Image (cartoon, helix red, strand yellow):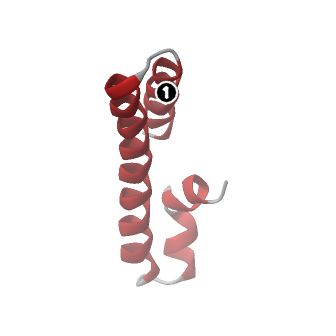
């Protein structure tokens, strides 16, 4: 999931740099939206797993994703 979102963000931002006007704004907005969606998913999962204690939290995939 992280790789897919990263590819989408980089693709949208890369295409946006080559455009002007409304198309540029649309592509940069889409890139930001994909990034915010990933952040929301990881935060939701993190908050859910924190109730299971430290071991459950560290065993979950969201910690390595959120760490960088």
Front one among 21 and 45 = 21
- For mark 1, give the secondary structure: helix
Taking the image as shown, residue 8 lies to the left or right of residue 64, namely left
Up-down: is 5 above or below 62?
above
Up-down: is 65 above or below 10?
below
Percent coordinates x, y for residue 53 in the rendering? 50, 84
- x 53%, y 22%: residue: 17
Percent coordinates x, y for residue 12 in the rendering? 43, 26
Q: Quadrant of the C terminus?
A: bottom right
Up-down: is 22 above or below 1?
above
Taking the image as shown, residue 22 lies to the left or right of residue 54, namely left
The quadrant holding residue 52 is bottom left
Taking the image as shown, residue 59 lies to the left or right of residue 23, namely right
- x 56%, y 80%: residue: 54
Q: Which residue is mark 1?
A: 7
Residue occupying the far top of the picture: 18
Q: Quadrant of the N terminus?
A: top left
- x 36%, y 45%: residue: 33
Residue occupying the far front of the picture: 21
- x 50%, y 28%: residue: 13
The quadrant holding residue 41 is bottom left
Taking the image as shown, residue 14 lies to the left or right of residue 32, namely right
Crowd tier of the residue under label 1, counting other residues whose Cα lies within 10 Å: few below 14, some 14–19, many 20 or above: some
Percent coordinates x, y for residue 46 in the rendering? 44, 70
Residue occupying the far right of the picture: 68
Front one among 64 and 17 = 17
């Amino acid at each position: 999931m992280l790789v897919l979102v990263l590819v989408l963000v980089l693709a949208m931002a890369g295409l946006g740099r080559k455009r002007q006007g409304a198309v540029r704004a649309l592509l940069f907005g889409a890139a930001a939206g994909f990034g915010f969606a990933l952040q929301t998913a990881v935060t939701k999962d993190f908050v859910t797993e924190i109730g299971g204690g430290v071991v459950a939290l560290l065993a979950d995939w969201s910690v390595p994703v959120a760490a960088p």
